Amino acid sequence: MRVLFLVLGLIATISSATAANVSRRPQAILNAAPLCGAANAAPTAIDWDAKDREPRSCDPATARDYVPKFKGLGFEILTFESEACFVPDQSFRLLDDIVGTVVSRVAAAPPSDPAEKAMLVSTITSSVLTEFGFALWIPTRNLSDALISRRTDSDRYRYLFDCDTGSMILLTVAQALGMDATLVESTIPSNTDPRKRVQHNFVRWTLADRSEVNWDMNMRTMCSTPTLNQLPYQGKPLTMDQLWSYEKQLRGSLWERTRHYSESTKDFRQAAAQFPERDVPYNNFAWTVATKTFPERASFVKDALEFALKAVAISGDANNLDTLACVYAHTGDFQKAIATEKRAVDAAPQKSLPDFRRRLQGFSTVPPQDCTGED
């Protein structure tokens, strides 16, 4: 199964950081902070019409007239994603307005303490997103999906974000202010299925005294780093190369959404090379080869098996096992496909069980069926 995105957490209302929290040294209250990803704060898009939560359409590219006032990660990502699915000027303008609003408010009353400033910038950014009409929706697949209007200006909430897209906006603000912040990935348990673990992202501020403050955009508050059942790279700040590997994986899924499978496998392959400790790009490359028809497919089968095995070696979860089973089926080794899919079924979260069992049945029919055409 291809990995899309991140975390389905508990929908709960959590108040944003108060002025009292900002005025205290965050390290003094860090132990009392909830685990990153423990819950999600309102406003959410849970009551929106389903069509308003679908990924954005990819319109034909047009001449770009708008020149952003600010620079940084978010603008680079929008340009990068525009190669796969054109991002209109309005999205660049919206990000510019968000960054400019936060920067001006921080400048109006800048705290001298670095920890207090990190908390203030985080709090203001979360508040500005709400003021600009952003509501939480998981998954919001790409930053360019977050910055596209979903509803009319008469609706209070018109835009979507989630943990990684919101974090990328906060990181863009940090760059505009010359502050040191990084993206952190973690694994947390799903509240909907005890057998399922999901990915979650948050921002870590690194201060001059080498202390750290975490901010969870979904929770709109400071949080503490999850420590249980983490992969070796998780819970640590991503390097810029690792962050761009993460973004290439996201753009690979954007290419796949538009049925440009040659381009998606290229992005997945580059993402894996840039961040070999992470299983997701390996898995997504293998899944695309095992399920989609495109010119290079036959020549990628050996790589797909290698990548699927690497993904399972990093994390032998049900999702990666399901992908490996599909790759075995595509190679014609249905005995290994059946054995591997049985392992996936045994470990599967409830939501995935019907698909896994259907694929297992297909491997066992006469003649056996592989996973070509699966989503």
Image (spheres, rainbow, N blue to C red):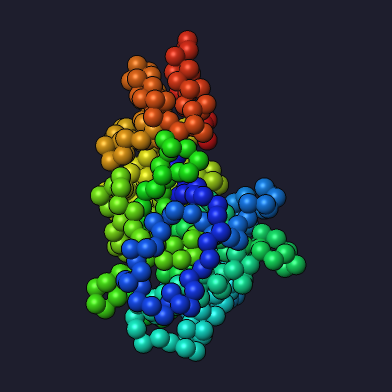
Q: Most extreme residue toward the right, as rendered?
A: 154
Q: Residue at x 29, y 59 (%)?
A: 236
Q: Residue at x 51, y 79 (%)?
A: 102
- The residue closer to the viewer here, 21 or 133, is 21
- Where residue 163 appears, as percent x and y from the top left, is 47, 58
Quarter of the figure that contains the N terminus: top left
- Where residue 158 appears, as percent x and y from the top left, is 66, 63
Q: Most extreme residue toward the top, as rendered?
A: 366
- Where residue 33 appears, as percent x and y from the top left, is 39, 63
Classify residue 212 by image quadrant.
bottom left
Q: Residue at x 34, y 58 (%)?
A: 225
In screen coordinates, is 22 left or right of 150?
left
- The residue closer to the viewer here, 101 or 301, is 101
Residue 68 visible in the current orientation: no
Classify residue 96 by image quadrant.
bottom right
Residue 358 visible in the current orientation: yes
Is 365 rendered above or below residue 44?
above
Q: Most extreme residue toward the bottom, as rendered?
A: 108
In screen coordinates, is 271 left or right of 109?
left
- Where residue 17 appears, as percent x and y from the top left, is 48, 71
Q: Residue at x 45, y 33 (%)?
A: 349
Is 283 rendered above or below residue 343?
below
